[in-house]
Image: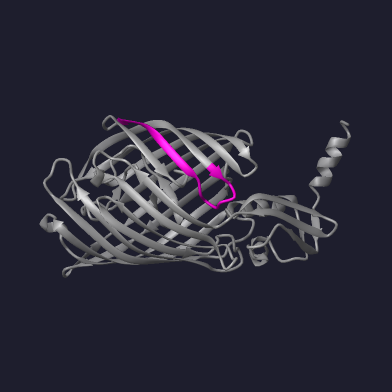
Amino acid sequence: MALIAPLVAALNSEPCDATRLEPRGFSKVDLAVVEEVLPRKLPTCLDQAEIAEFERRLWTLGLFDDVKVECGGGALTVTVREKWTLIPGADFGTAKTLRDSYFFLALVESNVAGRAIECGGYGAYYERAFSGETWCGEHPFGARRLSYELNLNYVGSGFVFDDEPFLWERRRTGARLGVRLPFPYGSAWRFAILPNGYHEGIKGDAPPAMRDAGWFGGIGLRAVYDGYEWHDLVPRGFRFGIEVTPGVYFGDGEQHGRHSVTAQTLTAFRFSQRTGLVTNVVGEAVNAGDVNHSFLLGSISAWRGSFGTVGGVRGLPDNRNRNQTHLFSNVELRHSIGITSRLFIQGAAFADGGVYRRMNSAGQVLSFEPALSGGVGLRVLPTFLAWAIFRIDGGRLFLPEEAWFFQLAFSQYL
């Protein structure tokens, strides 16, 4: 037996000549998606690293809750179990007042025309205002061609300051086009160009320097290192992304720069088939001087374009932490218990923490402040539904003040 094991390992590491594709379990997902995700067109010779990467990318499409790739006898056999992909969603988060609470309704189709194209839309009430967004994006694994993403949005944001009398609403209507560049299959790096723009209007009692309506135009540049494998129960791997957006705001006869940067690392450790640890670190900054151009650190799991969910600090008020820069982290330990082969209960323990530099109503940057919270959560995971779970989180905010919080949602926090 001691001699057989190395021989088996050596045989398994041999390249495989694949002359044909044998798909199993496909009904709604077009085989063109599988062919796009392949390292190159068949017939070809694939090594074991390429086969493992091919399988990781199929998992990370999020359209299957079981994927198995085998190569032998001239056939590349791909066996999958497809998910239902038209998914409604809802989130709800409590605050000290109903006016400061958070409500969110969405509908997302993750497999438009069978081509792994995600299109969706949402309507929400948060930051004391209504917002809506619709988007479409191709899957990101078409290495040999350009791929695209498009976002149209209306964002209302209520501005509240603990120590100042001003209260106004910023309204933005905008669009963003993402053009993802081709990449070598063996590389984990992805690059995209993201021209975007919006019109901004102000309603309410803003200070004079913050009342300028106008137009913004910018071009974002995004780089992503992608070694992350999504899995409903226990993802694994590492993903790093950074997006820099220089831009110009034209308002009432004047113009000035509006620049921003967002960086995120997402790391997941798989301890077993049911237990894992996920860590998320996010840093963001804008140029100072204009509070209408700021980030907001709160309890809501924020959406940053095709970065997707970037998290926040659970328990923080969602409209009182306008800041010029922040750095925060989420750590979540998860363990799942199977009810059926496609339905699981998952418990989670989490800790969120960070620092941020708030801006006052005049755009002045204040000193650094800490944020820290922790708690536990319960999820119901029907793995036959794409990107959908039922989640309840509850816990305690410790800094900058103490408060209990509760969240109900139909998505993972990160």
Of residues 226 and 132, the one drawn nearer to the viewer in this rendering: 132
Rendering coords of residue 410 (x, y %) = 45, 47
Of residues 139 and 323, the one drawn nearer to the viewer in this rendering: 139
The answer to if 390 sits in the magenta stretch is yes
Q: In the rendered structure, which segment of residues is drawn in magenta? A: 381-398
Q: Can residue 386 be seen in this view?
A: yes
As drawn, the residue found furthest toward the bottom would be 253
Q: In this view, does 378 lie above or below 171?
A: above
Rendering coords of residue 207 (x, y %) = 12, 54
- Identified at 36% across, 32% down, the residue is 373
- Identified at 26% across, 37% down, the residue is 368
Describe residue 266's horizontal placement relative to residue 383 as left or right.
left
Query: Residue 144, located in which quarter of the rendered image?
Result: bottom right
Q: Is the magenta stretch mostly helix, strand or loop?
A: strand
- Identified at 21% across, 53% down, the residue is 289
Q: How is this picture coloured?
A: one colour
